[in-house]
Image (cartoon, helix red, strand yellow):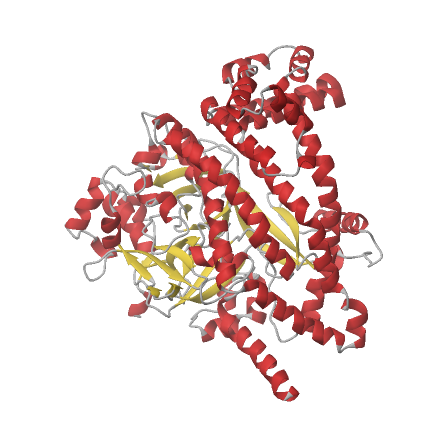
Amino acid sequence: MKYFKNLLIACSLLISSLVKAEEGMWLPQLLEKLNEKQMKSLGMRISAKDIYSINTGSLKDAIVSFGGFCTGEVISSKGLVLTNHHCGFDVIQDHSTLDHNYIRDGFWAMNNGQEIPHKGLFVTFIVRIEDVTKQAMSGVDSKMSEIERQSTIDKNINEVRKNVKKETYQDSFVRGFFEGNQYYLFVTETYRDIRLVGAPPSSIGNFGKDTDNWMWPRHTGDFSMFRIYAGRDNKPAEYSADNIPYTPKKSLSISLDGLAEGDFTMVFGFPGRTTEYLHSAAVEQIMTVNDPAKIAIRDKALAVIDGYMRKDEQIKIQYAAKYANISNSWKKWQGEILGLTRTEAINKKKRYEAEFQKRVDANPLWKAQYGSLLKELGMAYTEIKPYGYARDYYTEIISKIELFAIASQLNSLVAAYEKEGDKGYQQRLQVVKNTLQGLYGEYNPEVDKKLFEVLMEMYVKDQESKYISPQVMEMLVKEESVYPRWAAGVFEKSDFDDMNTTIARLDQPATDVVKYIKNSAVVALYSDLVKTYQTQTQSNLNEIQSRINKLQRTYMQAQMEVMKERKFYPDANSTLRVTYGNVKGYSGRDAVKFDHYTYLDGVMEKYKPGDYEFDIPEKLITLYRNKDFGQYGSKGKMSVCFIASNHTTGGNSGSPALDAYGNLVGLNFDRVWEGTMSDINYDPSLCRNIMVDIRYVLFIVDKYAGAGHLIKEMKLVHPKKK
């Protein structure tokens, strides 16, 4: 009986590894060794060297990190870059006014001269990736403290970067993988003259807005276009009117053939962060403590902002990006809890840990090294639980009240002055001015005052008293715990919410400015909030987290050693990755089966004239009624979005979806709500990424916007007609 039980467990593990063929965010330079065979079994028709090569142009040379927060891809020989509408939204918003509302109306440059430069925007290419684990870990031993270990690694990395072979216009960075058990060097090229070329109106680029966010079926044309400019030598250069469109090593060909269920797909991009190898206690805390706390705070913040946005067009423009950013994670966390619950993620982790512990206990060497590892991790997570909750309350609330952001910037001037006198003050001054001008451009004091009132009430009522600022409690006693009155008093006694007054004051002598800031009640309140957090929460949190980090690194090493039949991939850390799978639908809940494609018909079914989320332009309605889809439609229908089993996360926004031949077929922009837990627990039954069909993108550019000159830059192909 024992033999059959062990056989059942072994079979279960094997089946699990086979079912999760789609799971993983793989380093492109290792595909030939680890993944190529499996990728071809799923339908890929190109080689791993076509994806990543340092000697010849490959797909990696068409992929860029867009601004450091999204992914983009080069789609023409003239440096045209495609990314998501929501990735380009800050740029679109910054250049929008009431007279030229590019958020509402869209924007299209009909020639290079009309393309809009945007200061601070950049794209980064990966030139090559090298394993530098041996160099990075030189001199590191298990007896070191975490601080000593990291200091040694940092020194080693500095030496690696100092000695790396690269061109003068190139840069490099080193990133840790598998919890700091491996290290890779990335040589990069960054271009900083990036110009807005085109964006559809939000009624197309963000159709469905918050209601449809993270949901399937989806009908969103989530794309925008930019162009990379370079110096006359095609090398990176700061903005200049003399710069020319960049000529890439590789640009993506675009397929007009579409996809069928079961077709191979691959997503290439810069996923932000995942935590796939956590202890079960960590997952349980995410589900029951951290996510619910953050959701509750954002519930309140979104309700306040939405109420003002619906009443005032100017506030709608100012707060559109902030609202979207707050809402994005708020809804994602809800789906994460749902998915983790439905897939029994905690129990799966516990079964896996039981098998790990069983193997460790059966091996004397492993038992000596790892025997108590899981128990220690569980105890550490129990210890960190209250501090994690307090951290989330502090960071979520303080970051939503922009009066505190203003106070923080001004307080940094005081710190600079007290450390280095007038010299330090002057060095910091321009940074503060620039930051404040950007902040005030998207700021409304009435909205902020209401946020203060609502969120500070949560700060006080939803936490243990030891985590609450003493000054807050003193103020509330004076105001008899009437939060609206308290908020009104705070804002009335400060002029930090007035841009002109605050910026003008910064032109006064440093001594006067510093004195004024130090006497400010708002700065005093902000400082006490920070101090309370640092002493009551952060110091304890950091100490426990340091222990967890060390234990987690050991656990990661142990898993790779003990669970040898499993193929491990590193967690996402904003470095270039490849993920692959197949086009397929899924069952969202009992008796509900979702198809893999959506069409323009669905846009019309959702259409609500004048609605904030579901209105659409009249021209799009006319094109639909006339079935005027050009070469981009098929059988009288216009496809819009599709889903597949590619393992994606934040940072993959804007990533190209590629077909079996490496042609661009879609633009990744989201995940299905039930599968957002893929950052913690990828499950093939629910995890699907959402992509806008490239044919819908081209249809909007050509037939809707009349920007056919952009289509002429692209290479359109029909791979299925070969």
Q: Of residues 165 and 412, which is closer to you in this image?
A: 412
Q: Of residues 282 and 239, which is closer to you in this image?
A: 282
Q: Quadrant of residue 717?
A: bottom left
Image coordinates for residue 626, horizontal then vertical, percent: 14, 50
Q: Residue at x 70, y 75 (%)?
A: 358
Vertical placement of residue 583 versus 234, above or below = below
Image coordinates for residue 437, horizontal then vertical, percent: 51, 23
Q: Residue at x 43, y 55 (%)?
A: 673
Q: Kindly give the residue lying farthest to the front in the view shown.
A: 480
Question: Quadrant where the C terminus lies?
Answer: bottom left
Q: Of residues 190 and 367, which is closer to you in this image?
A: 367
Image coordinates for residue 331, horizontal then vertical, percent: 45, 47
Vertical placement of residue 419 versus 18, above or below = above
Q: Of residues 227 and 589, which is closer to you in this image?
A: 589
**Left or right: 229 in relation to 520:** left
**Left or right: 632 in relation to 520:** left
**Left or right: 260 in relation to 436:** left
Question: Quadrant where the N terminus lies?
Answer: bottom right
Q: Is residue 612 visible?
A: yes
Q: Kindly give the residue lying farthest to the left in the view shown.
A: 626
